[in-house]
Image (cartoon, grey):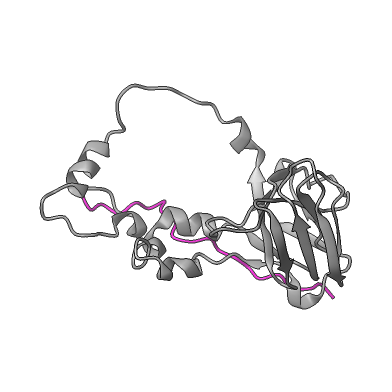
Amino acid sequence: MGNITLYITTLSDDLLPEPASPKRSWWGEDLATAGHAHHCLPLTMANSLGYVVRSPGAFRVTWDGDVDTHVTVDDVDDCVVDNHSAGGSFTIQPGFVPRTTDEGDFLMVRPVPNVRCPWFVAMEALIEAWWQPGEFGLVCLMTRAGSFAVRRGDPLAQMCVYRAEGGSARLDIRPGLPAETEAWRARRHRPDYRKDLDYLMGRHPDGTPEPTHRRNWKHVRAEPTP
């Protein structure tokens, strides 16, 4: 199993990355997602992949919406953040250097998934963290013009281990459908259909349990090493 080791530089213990949450607060506020999304395993697994990287301090960012214009960063408190990377972006140092254990265990940095209308989105990155000891900075792209404040502890991105094999997987093309797709369609579109949780519970269309099924990620909270 791949591990992530954080070498803390300036980050406070109360802001260590935490296991990502499977749910989103807005799901209960939207009639289309209330009572449904928190049972949708593809969404909850994506939401809870890895660990949330939080802002080590507070600051304000202002941007006029022109991609060629650099943002203005001010009201900075207890963090290192600037606009050096690109127009319409800001870069923040989260206060640690991450390393992975095994060759081929990339550190994947990705936006926090399935959030609604953020002011910014973290750029995705794959870092060869099993050997690369460089400074770790998050580059965040603005998504709309205006001025907004980032508070201490606000989520900035998520990080997880990504195995090298995933990027070089072969793509095979076959006609038709997988063996059980027609049975799944028939079950899903039957006249007396009621919402079931077959995928969530790991059941095939005929009700057979799938022994390899996962319902969650096994997270271990980060603890400082003495």
Q: 130 or 81: nearer the eye?
A: 81
What residue range appears in magenta?
206-226
- State yes or no: residue 210 in magenta: yes
Q: Position of residue 107 (x, y in %)?
A: 71, 49
79 vs 90: above or below: below
Q: Is residue 51 left or right of residue 88?
A: left
168 vs 101: above or below: above
> Seen from this angle, which residue lies furthest left?
191
Q: 14 or 212: nearer the eye?
A: 14
Residue at (65% x, 51% y) in the render: 143
Q: Position of residue 25 (x, y in %)?
A: 49, 70
Residue 136 seen from this side: yes
Please, what is the dominant secondary structure of the magenta stretch? Answer: loop
Residue at (22% x, 37% y) in the render: 182
- Quarter of the image where the C terminus is located: bottom right
Q: 175 or 99: nearer the eye?
A: 175
Q: Position of residue 221 (x, y in %)?
A: 66, 71
Residue at (78% x, 66% y) in the render: 60
Q: Position of residue 128 (x, y in %)?
A: 77, 42
Q: Disc count in the image?
A: 0
Q: Quadrant of residue 183?
A: top left
Q: Is residue 15 left or right of residue 21?
A: right
Residue 97 seen from this side: no
Q: 39 or 174: nearer the eye?
A: 39
